[in-house]
Every structure is written in C-alpha cells, then in structure tokens.
Image (cartoon, rainbow, N blue to C red):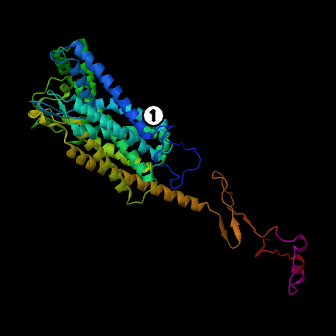
Amino acid sequence: MPSSGAGPRPPGTSGARPVPSGTGRPLAVTGAIAACAAAGIGITVLTLLVLVGWIAAPHAGLGLTGVLRTAALLWLIGHHVGFTLPGVGRIGMLPLGLVLLPGGLLWRAGRWVVRAGGVRKLGHAGYAALALAVPYAMVAAALALASSSARAAPSLPEAVVCSFLLALTAGGLGGARGIAPWNELTGLLPDRLRSLTVGTAAALALLTAAGSLLAAASLAAHLGEFRNVNASLGAGAVGALLLLLAQLAYVPNAITWAISFTLGPGFAFGAGTVVAPTGSALGQLPAFPLLAALPQGVHSAVPPSLSVAVLAVPYVAGAFGGLLTVRAGPVLALEAAPLWGFACGAITGCVLGVMASFAGGPLGNGRLAAVGPSAWQVGLVAALEVGVAAAVTAGVANWLRLRAAAAAERGAAGNEVVTAFGFTRLPDQDADHEPDDDGHRIYLDPWAGTADPDDSEVPPPTDLPGPLQSGFTASRGPSSLP
C-alpha cells in the first residue's frame, strides 16, 4: 500500500483515505498483532498464577491440560464472562478487579496500534479500536471453546460480546490518548457535553470515595470475624497469597455494594435477604474472609445515628456534581440550569446501574441465585436522588452567576463615557482617587484646538455697546467658558 507521501493517485481514487495504515502494514494487521499480544500476555500471567497454586496444592485428575484450561477460564472471567458448573448452575458473581489486567493491556495495545499504524487524526482512532476489538473477540471465542470441559463451560456469546466491548472501550481510550493529551481531548467536546462529563465524574468520584470508606469501616468493625474465617481455611503460605489476591479482585464489587447501600436499596446475598441502611437480614454466608464485613442475622445494619448521614451521601454527591456542571459550562438560562443538573444525575444513575449489574450475579441455582444489588433499583434511585440534588444546586449556582453578571454589567455601565450637549465627561481613571472637595466637574470642549490660529476670533456684533464689543471673544464651539 503506498504511503501518504506518494505521487498522484490513479484516476477514480479518493484523495482522503478513510483508514490510515502504517509503513507498509495495513491497520487491520496491526490491530490483529496487538490483539494477540494483549491476549497472550494476559493468559501467560494467569497461567503462572494457576501453575503456582497447582504446585502448592495439587489435585488429583488435574494435569497440565487442566491448568491451561483453568488459566483460560480465569482470563475469560477477567472479561466478566460467566460459566456453568455441572450440578451447581450458572456462576455470574465475578470479580471486577480482574478486569484491570486485560483492560490495562488493551489500553497499551490501543496506543501501540495508533502509533504503529500511523494514525494521526482523532477521528481515525475509532478505526484503530475496531481493528483491535474484532480479532480480540475472535481470540476470546476460540479460548471459550478450548476451555470448555465437563467441569466448567464458559458462555460463548458473553465471551464474544464482553471481550469486544472491553477491547473497543479500553483500546479506543488508549488510542485517543496516544494521539493527544487529555486536556486537548476534553477541549474537543462541546461546552454542554464537557460540563455534563465533569459533573458526572465529580458525583461518581464522591460516591466511590464514600463507598470505599464505608466498606473499609465495616471490615474494620468485623476484623475478628475476618481473622477467624481466614484461619479456618488453613490455606498455607501460597494459598493465603492466592486467597489475598482473590479478595483484592473482589474489592471493586464491595465498593459498588457499599454505594448501593448508601443509596437506600442496598443489596442481597441470597434469596429473601437484604442489607440496607434501615436494617439487614442475612443467613449463612460462604467461608470467604471478605464476607465477614457483612452483618449476619436480623438487626440494624448501621447505628441509627449514622443512618441519616449514610443516606445523605447521594444528595451531597448530587450537589457537588450539579455545582461543577454549572461551573464547567457557560452561563445558562435561568430555567435551563436545573434541567442540565438533573441530566447529570440521570447519567450518574445509568452508570451506577451498569456497575451494579456487573458487581453481582448468581452463585448457582440454589439459595444464592440472587447476589448483589438490583441494577434497575440502583439506577432509578440514584437518578432521582442525585438528579434532584444536582438540579437544585445547579439552579441556585446559575442564578448566583446570573446575578453577579448583572451586577458587573451595571457597574460597567456606570463607568462608561457620557457625552451630552457637546461636552465629554471624563471617566474616573483611578477608583481610589477621591473627588475634589468643592465637587466641581471639569468639562472639555471637543472643538478646542481645532480652529485656525489666524482665524481664531470672529468679529463681534455691531449692535453691542462699545465696552462689550472690546471684550467680546467667541470660540468656534457651540458655547464658551468665561
């Protein structure tokens, strides 16, 4: 394929090439190489972890082929691909922390594709992301078929869809970042969209910080139960390390559950269970140390004095998001600002609903078929709570901005140059200068100095008395000063 600096194109070819390519390599080939490299590195890392666990605690019937299948299954789980266990049912409660491994690799792969493929325009970053996502989804489909066995069978449709979306999102963001820095990328957004992005990010950041603090406080309050469960497993040194990694992978799930807790609907861990600020009802929990942070039994989830503070978190986040939505955008009309504030809350609710849907899932077909928060409840409640608070705050903040702008305009109008009856009033040059004590104003004659020196005087009227004629001097202006 000729480079962009080649000679004249043949007749009938377009002057603009929609899909740029690298030096002698099509963009599709570059994307396929990056996809295979990202998938290969991820599988290699997980294979080493599985191999360490297999050596430390070998199981009968699980040979090297089983190790490779387990590593491929973990790689698919990192893309949030569920699987089915015979006699147990579908497993969809997957750790969100594992998404960071393929996501980071795809980020780097997207940056490499735009650089190696010669992509220079931001509009072509979508082609690079698509060239990466399509072969990556094909690799995921092949691994789903290869890792399927009588012990576990991953979902083939989820493997294709989830891997494609993750590669398209992470690779596209990485490719865009490889073309231009963040400040230039955000500057390309329209004013309204940029203000909504800033407000939504602020609300989500505050909710995430509050959820992290709440989850850490709950775990610290049940630290004794955490140690007892961890000791009862008897995992050993290597097993304890792998168990710690597994718990760290579930930390994003715990933060999402804590955010759902602050919103009010809470979450469930089994059919007929609930954990909410108003109270909790839980049964027997699996022997997983991180679950020790959940209050078992039927009682109040948090002290009554803290319930109000916990439930106020979404409103504070909405107020913060609405304030930044107004500050990041231009001055809005008085009636439009609350609508943009509520739009910020609605987008925040949609994001939290998606997070809640990925943070939970079934753990079989039995009692634990319902685990985690309800996606539609979290999304709806978050949109209402955050949206109302953001709308009120955005309306008040915008009204204050309009009031300040009006005051500034009135102040500027008071300092304008005033011209009346042919005289010009000089504006104040120094705001701190005090006026004269006698209150006199100095006026300038706009016609002064424009007359001809030889014709600076006109003859006086002949009908005036002699003394007045001798002292009469008229200027060329409409009036004269004595």
In the image, residue 348 sits, relative to residue 140, either above or below, namely below
Residue 228 in the magenta stretch? The answer is no
**Mark 1: which amino acid?**
Trp
Q: Is residue 241 visible?
A: no
* 440 with respect to 281 (left or right): right
Classify residue 452 by image quadrant.
bottom right
Residue at image position (54%, 42%) is 3
Position of residue 327 in the picture relative to residue 165 (left or right): right
Q: Is residue 432 visible?
A: yes
Does residue 466 sit above or below 440 in this rendering?
below
Residue 68: percent from left, percent from top: 25, 22
At which x and y percent is residue 226? 20, 21
Bounds of the magenta span? Answer: 450-468
Q: Which residue is mark 1?
A: 112
Secondary structure type for disc 1? helix
Viewer-side residue, 186 vs 209: 186
